[in-house]
Amino acid sequence: MPLQVITANRLTDGAAVYLTPSGGWSTRVADAHAASDPETLGAIKARGDAAVADRLVVGVYAIPLAADPAAGPARLRERIRATGPTVTPPGYRAPADAAQLGPAAPGVRPDATV
Amino acid sequence: MRLLDLTLGRVVEDALTALDAAADPIAAIGAGSVIVPATRWTELRDRVGATPAGPIGVRLGADRPDLVDRLVRDLDRLALIAVVFESFRDGRGFSIARTLRERHGYPGRLRAQGWLLPDQFRFLARCGFDQIAPSDPGRLDEWRAHLDRFSVRYQATAADLHLKPAGQEPSYAI
Amino acid sequence: MQLYNYRADDRRFLAERVAEFRDQVARRLSGALSEDEFKPLRLMNGLYLQLHAYMLRVAIPYGTLASHQLRALAEIARRYDRGFGHFTTRQNIQFNWIKLEDTPEILALLASVDMHALQTSGNCIRNVTADHFAGVAADEIEDPRIWCELIRQWSTLHPEFSFLPRKFKIAVTGSPEDRAAVRVHDIGLVMVRDDAGAVGFEVLVGGGQGRTPMIASTIRRFVPKRDLLSYLEAIMRVYNLHGRRDNLFKARIKILVQSLGAEAFARAVDAEFATLQGGLATVDEAAVARIAADFAPPPYRPADPAAPEVKSVAAVEPAFARWTRTNLFAHKVAGHTAVIVSLKPPGGIPGDASADQMDALADLADRFSFGELRVTHGQNLVLPHVRLGEVPELWRALDVHGLATANAGLISDMIACPGLDYCSLANTRSIPIAQRLSRRFSDPDQIDRIGPLEIKISGCINACGHHHVGHIGILGVDKKGDEFYQITLGGRADGARSALGKLLGPAIPSARVIDVVQQIIDTYLAIRCPGEPFADTVARVGVGPFKTATTQERRDEAA
């Protein structure tokens, strides 16, 4: 059973966020509460759904991590969502807030063949 | 149910009652002050006497524009037509309203009911609805603010020509 | 400059709309509106939730932009986003890292320059697009933007048509040569003359791309101007009432037209039109005249069509000479040209411009083009009113900012949707494909030799990259978690010759795409008749020779 984490988008800024063991939301997948047994996952997801009702996040769902969890999410789409676009637009300027990832961010490269 | 009556300019209680599933529809029609499903109108219309005891209404889903044809020859006998929005996204109700008002000249009360957002109230009124009954009556609270949100419009419907407060002429004014 | 001048009413309307959206955001944050309820409302204000953040799509009506408006877009890019914007295939601009709570302020900033994000998304009538050479093309019957503006107003917060089965896209061409791709729109309008010489509209319905691409059918050969809006209302009412609402992928008007047949659909519209003709939507000539006055030609000064400055600079600077051959459009006023500003530099992201580039272009528009720019549906920009004699100076200034790539209409002038790098709908990335292709095909002599060729890349079946009408179309598909691409040939969106591309073969992995495109090009160069452009060669020989050339390698590998 692969490890899964719960993810959503933050309501205020739409950032991809991951539910942490303490029940908070982090923009880093590495901080997420990972589980593989259905019961624990169910409990984590329920906390995620509660956050929707509390108007913190929208669109809660579970995603599998890669076979080596240190590589982040299994699917390309989720890897890009976690680390930002794989391209650098003209004039791109990252915000001061380092937690907001974007192109050329250090960390997991979703596709080495680009 | 509570509803906004635009002609009266305030929130009132419904004067009519929806036909009870268990009740005898013929008797109900005879007594009047009842809303029957439009799907049953063809079978019931002959039972409506020359002078009904009370107002008769019909109800159709926004997803049944085809039922309008069944009502067209009896529009002067219908005190109320209620269009039910099962989803606020079902925009057919707006075309049903304009067709009834502008093509067929329906003179009675036209009610929008169901899952409706206050943000739609102005569209509903402009299409010719003069009663709005959202399933969540709490949504009626700020109705005037929503209706008065815009002083400019870019189209003219028949209802626009009569709505208070008077809207601006569209930029491409006739 | 030719721009619709907002009157006091229009400005008050925008202010009221901003106030409404501010209230909607507040009610979302307070919980008075659920996300289900808020979503269509925010979409009607152009606000998407994408992979990384909210994306705001700002309307650029019929692709016409004033310099001060472009400066406002640059300010939004700097202040509220990450320093750049992306111009789209519907002549709009997108910003990718918008915060919900900033949106009312951004809309207020836009309103201060008579701009908005109204109806750039959602199940309503979207930006009405036009020929990007409107007003300056010699073959134009009339400037279509006058009618685009009329339709824009009529469709803005239309009480009957704001909750359609699906999105609705209208395009208008004022020329017999269709530079607005009208045949792949829900409604395409072609300005035509009747036998008496009066100008009216040929109306086409049911074109579109996506999952089920179709070319539009003509349902009426001539609609007089005064009946235009009444006739459009008739079409919209038939669609609103009878378009499918049970299946997202079958909800566009093209499905309805196909299921009824164009004939029966036309009759249904006629029946509705009979009740509307002469009614409330009848077009008022005085209102049209007011709009038309805003699109009067700018005060052109006499200019020498021989343009000795151009010739003398071209003689000594080959790069300039090449650029004048590719990026200048023949203008209807002698001694002038419309300059195509390429947003497709080698290895660049199609359609992206930095805030600095936007500011530079705004200044150049003021200096050289009466303060006016256009956005093309091919993700480039245009300076539409340039004196030929000033072209060398303009070119140097563009070059300084990386905006002078000489590739208009050539192989490296690609269309690419944002794809999986940004978009939550995508299966694969499209931008890296465009970048790799543009690096492979960057040698100016090479791309000149290849000639006109339109590559269009979509990251998913929604076809925002218009791949169905690419001469070479590339569609990203997800195959067991890997990025694969289907290649089509022979698509085109040029008027009566419009056609959808045909599949070349099974999907290929990302690593092979560039080589396969190279094989297609090599085949074309080998079999073309002298001077025959790529699209015509494909039309003449079909997909066969290209299939053979591109599968050969696989057979060799297997051997």
Image (tube, coloured by chain):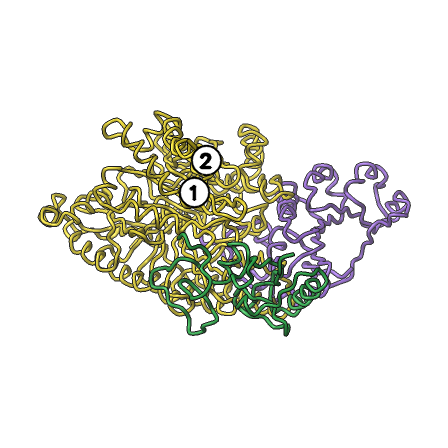
Between residues C29 and C482, which one lies in front from this camera angle?
C482
Q: Tell me the residue that label 1 is attached to.
A: C466
Identified by mark 2, the residue type is: Val
Name the chain under label 2: C
Element on which disc 1 rests: loop
Chain coloured purple in the rendered structure: B
- Secondary structure, mark 2, is strand
Is B111 located above or below residue A21 in the figure? above
Residue C202 in the image, given as x and y percentages of width and height: 43, 34
Where A22 falls versus C338 (above or below)? Answer: below
**What is the distance, in whole Å, between disc 2 and disc 1 at their CAs?**
22 Å
How would you rate the neighbour count of disc 2 (Cα within 10 Å): few for under 14, some for 14-19, many for 20 or more?
many
Q: Which mark is residue C12?
A: none
> Can residue C209 be seen in the rendering of this structure?
yes
- The residue to which callout 2 is attached is C203
Please name the residue shown 45% across and 65% down the image. A107
Color used for chain C? yellow
Of residues C41 and A112, the one nearer the viewer is A112
On the rendered image, what quadrant is the C terminus of chain C found in?
Answer: top left
Residue C154, position in %: x, y?
48, 49
